[in-house]
Image (spheres, helix red, strand yellow):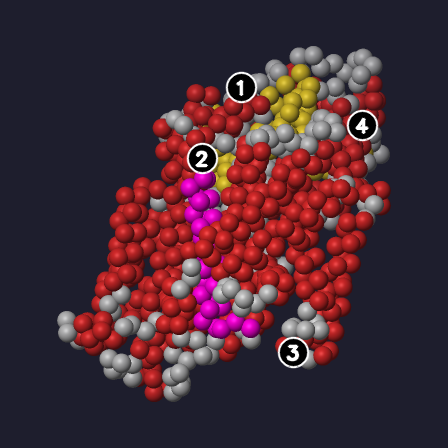
Amino acid sequence: MKHHWRRWITPLCSLLLLGLALTLLYHLTHEWRWKDVRHALGSSSPRSLLNALLMTLVSYGCLCLYDLLAVRLAGARLPWLKVVQTSFVAYTFSNTLGFALLTGTSVRYRAYSAAGLSTGAIARIILFCSTTFFLGLAALGGMALIGGQSDWLQPLWPHWIAKLLDVAGWALLLLVAAYLIWPKRWSGRHADALPGQGARLAQLTVALLDWMAAAAVLYALLPAGSVSYPMLLSAFVLAALLGVLAHVPGGLGVFEAAMTLLLGHHIQANQLLAALLLYRIVYYLVPFTLALILLAIEELRQNRHLRSGVRYLRNLLPAFISLGTFAAGTLLLCSSVLPTLHSRIDAMLALWPLPLLELAHVLGGVSGILLLLLARGLYRRLDAAFHLAQLLLAVGMLFSLLKGDWEASLFLFVFLSIISPCRALFHRKGSLLHTPLTPANLLAIGAVLLGTLWLLLFSYRHVPYDPSLWLTFTPTASAARGLRAMGAVMAVMLMAGVAQLLSPLRQAAEPPTADELQRARSLISGDGDIHGALAQLGDKSLLFHPSGDAFLMYGCEGTSWIVMGDPIGQPHAIEELLWQFAELCDAHDVTPIIYQASPRYLPCYLELGLIPFKLGEEAIIDLNQFELSGGKLRNVRQSHSRGKRDGLSFEVIPACEVQHYLPMLRTISDAWLSKKQGREKGFSVGFFDEHYLCSNPLALVRKTDTERNESRLVGFANLWTGVSLHCLSVDLMRYHPDVDHGPIMDFLFVELLLWGKAQGYQHFNLGMAPMSGLNAPPLGSFWARLGNTLYRRGNRFYNFQGLRRYKEKYAPEWQPRYLLCSSKLALPRTLTHLIGLISRGPLALGKS
């Protein structure tokens, strides 16, 4: 959280660049007229549109070659049609919507992972495609900066800036050349990620063709002979470079401002703007529409059964409703600041008074900004967001009618009619204040607000600003109405920002009650569910099956709800309980995670859509076969004998007697913690808590001083037991730091094993050895190879191998334990949340 603010730097810088670009565009288009632009749009010939569509096809064909080359170099064997379709959809999404990591990358990961490619192969494909894209941009951008300084670019800026741009151009070309000729043998461990020189040359060739074809789309839409193609290509790549640096979806606004600056002296303003608008439609909107159709057809083809098709449609619709709501809000905002035709104003004033018309403009804009803010809540399927969005759409439709905007009112009516039957899809409960703006939300909403402000200033640029405009109410005062609407919108946005800052944190789940703890204790049989004793810590919430025959315990951290171990109770209720938990997570828009799961319920976890990652292995000792005699336990036997000679003795006291020993136990625990110089952990391990210690039997270790003939308590461990005598285990172990820990720990464990065997227990659980038992062949998963590397080389952070060797002394049987999460990409976030829970972070339920 310390560096939480850093993730806002990029969107804020993007908005700043967009604001500067729109300011520049405003000054460059001071003499533009909307009617001239409409005339230029209408004068576009069908032949120019056909040529533009053809060049668009060529450009996207080159983009598809990116993926074809990448898949081939990754060693994958996929049908070329599948690769082309995936590439087309991915690039249209990232070009039109921006945020390539969330759009294009997600499309590729979904398609290629379904085709059987590993995460590593998909990552190499994405890296190759990104490199190819920027390789062409850098090559043509460098040539444009160098070649344009002496003729048409140089007059735009001072001589010293031209020199700097010349240096930047050479730097880009040198960077491209270095990439092309860099030997693989100098790349060290990254040599596998660097393609061969032939592949790199193919990358550059395809990238150059792609950028030249994309520029040719705009060239075909410009009036014939208005500008040469080389000049247009140079301006095009420089404008695109600025758009990429701005991180605005499609470079919207930034690209237009740069093209106007670079070509405004060569092409009439109205013709250039018309060509740029047509370019947005031909190169972005038409392919995006086709991509949506292809994506829907492909998904329906993969989900041929009616049930799976309906399920897929239910998962997809909220995202499109969210997108449509954002578009509706944008429409209302723009409509509130644009001038209304005088004929429509006269018609409206014949029906209702002027104050109603004025109010419609202001409240229409307010409805628009509220719809923009609600779009994320709709994406998260919040029921409150859906109800409020329906109300705002109806209100916006009414306000559009009142001010004479029939087209906007018709669009809102159609959209409201389409989404109204989808009420059942929005079932999640939650406060809208718990839906914080993300950096992507901020960028999208900020871009719309800046665009709306530009429309306001552009539409009334011939009206000088005067403070009296705020209070001017006449039928012809369109500028005053737009100004008031924009002011109301900014006031609502300010209040929304303050509400976000003052909103409470996401409420974690409630801690268990005393009755729930008692019910949980009665369900622990000891047959594979001995970890259920951790419920008594009170740092996890408990979820019970409706029958009361089973429960699970979970902690909340961020957007993850993490279950500790397998569910506990009657096996017949476990599957229903897991689905109950999954539905609860879905209702709260959080991700279900299972930590330290055994193979026992693995099929149920897989049905929930969770992916298993092996964490390590748990050591189980068969007490029926345990004997101190024999060669296997010689070291343990010797250490145990040494403890006896040192005067150690062992005793187990029942839970009802622990209260009497608590002051002495606290002294030992505090001394142990001070020696370790650490803080208490939680969630998956016990911490010193009086209620927890008094809930279980306790093993005590005393040391007798023969010279003084006195005995003192030097160590303790709380025991996990169940209703049956199936399994015994130990959790919280503390000893006084002035006692040699080697003999005392071996003495304690041997005495516990002997005591458990005498009491009739069948097994003793020694706990898990993290990262052990992970097979990591060269072609194994990335997680297995990472875990194996941590196990072998991570002793400076945690003694993985030492813990495994210590438990091996007791000759246990090893059983695998797993971490299950929703996807491979979610694993880093899952581990971060898990560490926060174990370290008893701010959202945990642990007691102070």
C-alpha gap between disc 3 and disc 2: 53 Å
Q: Residues within 10 Å of mark 2 (few under 14, many from 20)?
A: few
Q: Which residue is mark 3?
A: 155
On the image, which quarter does residue 265 sit in? bottom right
Looking at the image, can residue 67 be seen? yes
Q: Which residue is mark 4?
A: 643
| x and y percentages locating residue 441 in the rendered image | 48, 58
Select label 3 or label 1 by which is in front: 3
Which one is earlier in the sequence, the residue at label 1 or at label 2?
Answer: 2
Quarter of the figure that contains the N terminus: bottom right
Select label 1 or label 2 by which is in front: 2
The span picked out in magenta is: 266-295
Main SS class of the magenta portion in the image:
helix
Answer yes or no: do the residues labelled 3 and 2 have beta carbons within 8 Å?
Answer: no
Q: Which residue is mark 1?
A: 724
| Amino acid type, mark 1 | Ser
| Amino acid type, mark 4 | Gly
Which residue: 53% across, 56% down?
A: 217
